[in-house]
Amino acid sequence: MSAPNAPVPRALVALVGRPNVGKSTLFNRIAGRRAAIVEDVPGVTRDRNYADFLFEGRALSVVDTGGFEPESRDRLIAQVRQQAQLAVEEASAVVLVVDGREGLSPVDSSVADLLRRAGKPLFVAVNKVDTARTEEEIPLAEFFRLGFGEVHTVSAEHGRGVGELVEAIVAKLALPELPPPPEDAEEPEEVSESDRPKGDIRLAIVGRPNVGKSTFVNALLGTERFVVSDVPGTTRDAIDSLVEHRGQRFVVTDTAGIRRKSAIAQSVEAYSVVRAMKAIDRAEVVACLLDATEAGVEQDARLLGLVAEKAKALVIVVNKWDVAEREGATQDWYRKELYKRLPFVSFAPMLFVSAKEGRGVTRVLERAARLVEQYRARFPTPALNELLETIQEEHPAPLAKGHPVKLYYVAQVAYAPPTFVIQCNRPEAIGEPYRRFVENRFRDAFGLEVPMRLVFRERKRRSRPPSKRRG
Ligand code: GDP
Ligand code: GDP
């Protein structure tokens, strides 16, 4: 039994360049390759500048550091350099995107100087080279003079050369191949208790600026007089504190402190998102703070969408409840409104706190611990199959072209998040409504408040020679 969501070393590729060279087109082209690791979560905002993707079994993320409107020509260089600086701090590899048709510009050269000093793997993507003919016409030599190891001609719009660029990045970074997802296992493995992880719980505190993350963490640390120390060996770009509550240790990654550390950080949204993304990657459970006094639906939805996509356990923490309460808001009303707007996180519990008054703060830890227990849980196969039988008696899957659709057998194949493979006769005939119905019955039966995965698979023949197993 495996944990597909155990923190994977994810290489971050940053796209840098002046406006209009085609960064966001290239971003979409690269992110479009993302496949198995991230499933589409209905309702999640798609418009954004970071994405996880898989390339030949390697896990990567890509961030488009651009997306700003230049204030003026003078400011342009400064802004692009600032983006580049952030990219260099955060990324494993940096791609300077330039416009092949326009040739090298002073901004490109200036940014290149800055990047070269950083000592990270660097690539030039000479974009808008749509055809072999254009390739002959553009002044490629001047891009080589930038002194970067790798110059690639690409057409972000048509996809030309993009695969080769990503391949070169993967090769340069020597990324390890991920094991295949557990859903691909030939035979579902049975539940075993022996490899149950114990020990510390990794909790990430995220939320848009000013929701009260710092206040929350301070309250957490202050109230309980926890042992606070930097945890050695963790990534240098996150602030981790060790917190103990009722005998359970938490490694708390606080994305608020990070923002404060760097002055330029505050001006660039992509930066805080990347940091949050990394914190979420490394966590098992995420406390996402919202501000009860101020709707920031768009930004909240982005962060929550990330958590949902990465299938982490989640507790939604509505902060500043002291103010909202005085103004007459009720928890029931708020809860209903929020789940209606953000249906993709309706599985997650919602707590109401006042970080400022220290109210409800330790309840978040207690809830997080309970969620992690579910997240790591093993569900006994007999109980699962009993449930499957009950579900089908109550409400069998709709007929497929007049033929019955039968669910034969279910087993849990992974935890964190709990992942169940259901063997059936016609997986392709099972529509979204029935899938959701089965999921909800699983949730009800086990009181699940964490993300889960259901995979419908055609029943396989039981025995096969081991030599035929895929590696
Ligand atoms: P960004 O500001 O760097 O993110 O640039 P965009 O991705 O928004 O692209 C700027 C313009 O260049 C858009 O009109 C794109 O359609 C165009 N563009 C981007 N990539 C290519 C390409 O490979 N070939 C051509 N011909 N145009 C492109
Ligand atoms: P961060 O940017 O998410 O770290 O937010 P801060 O912790 O810096 O808080 C932003 C502002 O909200 C500060 O002025 C805090 O005093 C205030 N604040 C934080 N939590 C609460 C709360 O529970 N109630 C009230 N009324 N104000 C709060």
Image (tube, helix red, strand yellow):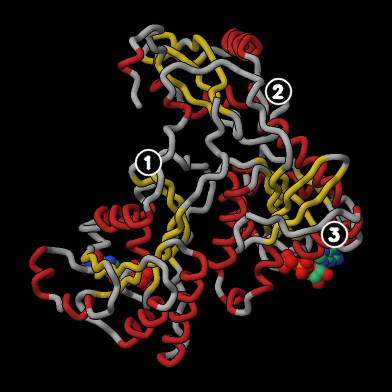
Mark 1 = which residue?
Answer: 57
* Of the image marks 2 and 3, the number of the one nearer the N terminus: 3
**What residue is rendered at 35% in x and 68% in y?**
122
Mark 1–mark 3 distance (CA, rounded to whole Å): 42 Å
**What residue is rendered at 88% in x and 41% in y?**
246
Mark yes or no: residue 29 visible.
Answer: no
Choose top left, top right, bottom left or bottom right for residue 22: bottom left
| Residues packed near mark 2 inside 10 Å, few (<14), some (14 to 19) or many (20 plus) | some
| Residues packed near mark 3 inside 10 Å, few (<14), some (14 to 19) or many (20 plus) | many
* Of the image marks 1 and 2, the number of the one nearer the N terminus: 1
On the image, the x and y values in percent for residue 97 come to 32, 71
Mark 2 = which residue?
Answer: 446
Q: What's the amino acid at mark 3?
A: Ala
Choose top left, top right, bottom left or bottom right for residue 14: bottom left
Q: Is mark 3 within 8 Å of ligand 2?
A: yes
Whereabouts is ligand 2, in terms of quadrant? bottom right
* Of the image marks 1 and 3, the number of the one nearer the N terminus: 1
Q: What's the amino acid at mark 1?
A: Gly
On the image, the x and y values in percent for residue 171 come to 32, 53
Left-right relation of 305 to 253:
left
Mark 3 = which residue?
Answer: 355
Mark 1–mark 2 distance (CA, rounded to whole Å): 33 Å
On the image, the x and y values in percent for residue 226 come to 87, 54
